[in-house]
């Protein structure tokens, strides 16, 4: 079975953890253990989030007196692909002796006129108190919004139109390679209408929506979205909270999940199932094997009732 795995940024750096390299390495050891059993039985493509990491690099870049201007988000996104991809590749290499593994920096085409550029919603970087977040926003010209752990920077998140290196990923997979790609949703680029020339853009593409598009283009059988909760919950954080263990795309969309957290994951799962007839699931990293075998998480599949 061909599986595209989308790792949440919090699977690599948990909420409230220091963004030290040793901390991320320890978390990636857990990722490798969770994916190894799947990789023995299936073809895997692994994508990953980068919210905490790109936010850290953006803060460092903005505060660096050696720079006349901070590095743009598309270049910072490329940096996170290299850093996280290297950590994942080395750890999976040790967990899967003899398996070819490649990390590929990938670019995601977006529309220059996407309305998302006028409405930043994608969280990046650490959470702060409201006062500190407002001070940072004033100083650096950032947009901020409230997240579950405090106030964070938000940036535009245009919809992915095409992953430019999909054919290369396909060739690597056909040779038996486990591919790590589309990290952080891919480096966002726009294309000139006349020449096709590519230009990086100040945005972060949602990694789950990119993973769904990649899974569709690769003709994957399964889209596995791994995060820090066991499944999707209706009424999350309220007295009426209840787990959603099985849903059609339409049922998942009716849940009205938050745009800054579960919303894109639900939409990505729904899109993949609708467009391909395959299966998608959302659940906890440590239960990856159990999720694929139907024993954990939220399974999303076609509505066979016709409702």
Image (spheres, grey):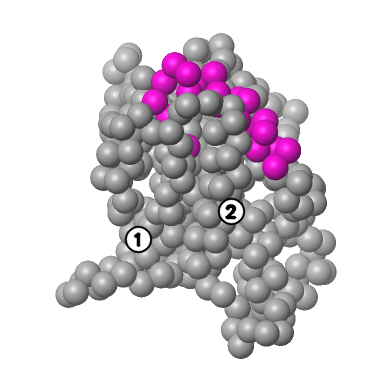
Q: Is residue 29 magenta?
A: yes
Q: Residue at x 53, y 73 (%)?
A: 72
Choose mark 1 or mark 2, whichever is in front.
2
Q: Is residue 293 above or below residue 203?
A: above
Q: Left of 41 or right of it: where is 237?
A: right
Q: Left of 218 or right of it: where is 74?
A: right
Q: Which residues are magenta?
A: 25-46
Q: Is residue 121 visible?
A: no
Tell me the quarter of the image containing the N terminus: top left
Q: Left of 184 or right of it: where is 160?
A: left
Q: Secondary structure at mark 2?
A: helix
Rendered image quadrant of residue 217: top left
Q: Position of residue 207 (x, y in %)?
A: 48, 47
Q: Earlier in the sequence, mark 1 or mark 2?
A: 2
Q: Position of residue 82 (x, y in %)?
A: 53, 54
Rendered image quadrant of residue 136: bottom right
Magenta span: chief secondary structure: helix
**Residue holding disc 2:** 83
Please identify the residue farthest to the bottom as the structure is shown.
68
Q: Residue at x 77, y 75 (%)?
A: 135
Rendered image quadrant of residue 190: bottom left
Q: Position of residue 283 (x, y in %)?
A: 58, 27
Q: Left of 59 or right of it: where is 100?
A: left
Q: Residue 301 has which mark?
A: none
Q: Residue 110 has which mark?
A: 1
């Amino acid at each position: 079975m061909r599986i595209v795995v989308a790792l949440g940024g919090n699977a690599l750096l948990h909420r409230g953890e220091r963004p030290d390299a040793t901390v991320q390495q320890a978390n990636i050891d857990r990722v490798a253990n969770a994916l190894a059993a799947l990789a023995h039985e299936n073809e895997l493509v692994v994508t990953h989030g980068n919210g905490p990491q790109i936010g850290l690099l953006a803060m460092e870049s903005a505060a660096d007196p050696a720079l006349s201007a901070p590095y743009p988000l598309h270049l910072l996104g490329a940096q996170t692909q290299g850093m996280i991809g290297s950590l994942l590749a080395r750890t999976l290499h040790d967990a899967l002796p003899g398996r070819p593994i490649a990390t590929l920096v990938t670019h995601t085409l977006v529309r220059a006129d996407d309305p998302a550029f006028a409405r930043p919603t994608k969280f990046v970087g650490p959470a702060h108190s409201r006062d500190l977040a407002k001070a940072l926003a004033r100083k650096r010209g950032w947009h901020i919004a409230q997240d579950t752990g405090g106030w964070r920077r938000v940036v535009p998140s245009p919809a992915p139109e095409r992953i430019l290196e999909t054919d290369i990923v396909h060739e690597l997979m056909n040779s038996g390679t486990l591919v790590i790609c589309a990290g952080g949703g891919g480096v966002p680029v726009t294309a000139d209408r006349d020449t096709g020339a590519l230009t990086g853009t100040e945005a972060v593409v949602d990694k789950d929506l990119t993973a769904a598009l990649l899974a569709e283009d690769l003709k994957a059988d399964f889209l596995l979205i791994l995060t820090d909760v066991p499944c999707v919950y209706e009424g999350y954080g309220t007295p009426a909270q209840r787990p959603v263990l099985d849903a059609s795309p339409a049922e998942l969309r009716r849940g009205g999940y938050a745009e800054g957290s579960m919303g894109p994951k639900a939409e990505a799962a729904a899109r993949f199932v609708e467009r391909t007839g395959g299966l998608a699931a959302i659940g906890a990293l440590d239960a990856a094997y159990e999720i694929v075998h139907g024993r954990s998480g939220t399974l999303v599949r076609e509505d066979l009732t016709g409702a």
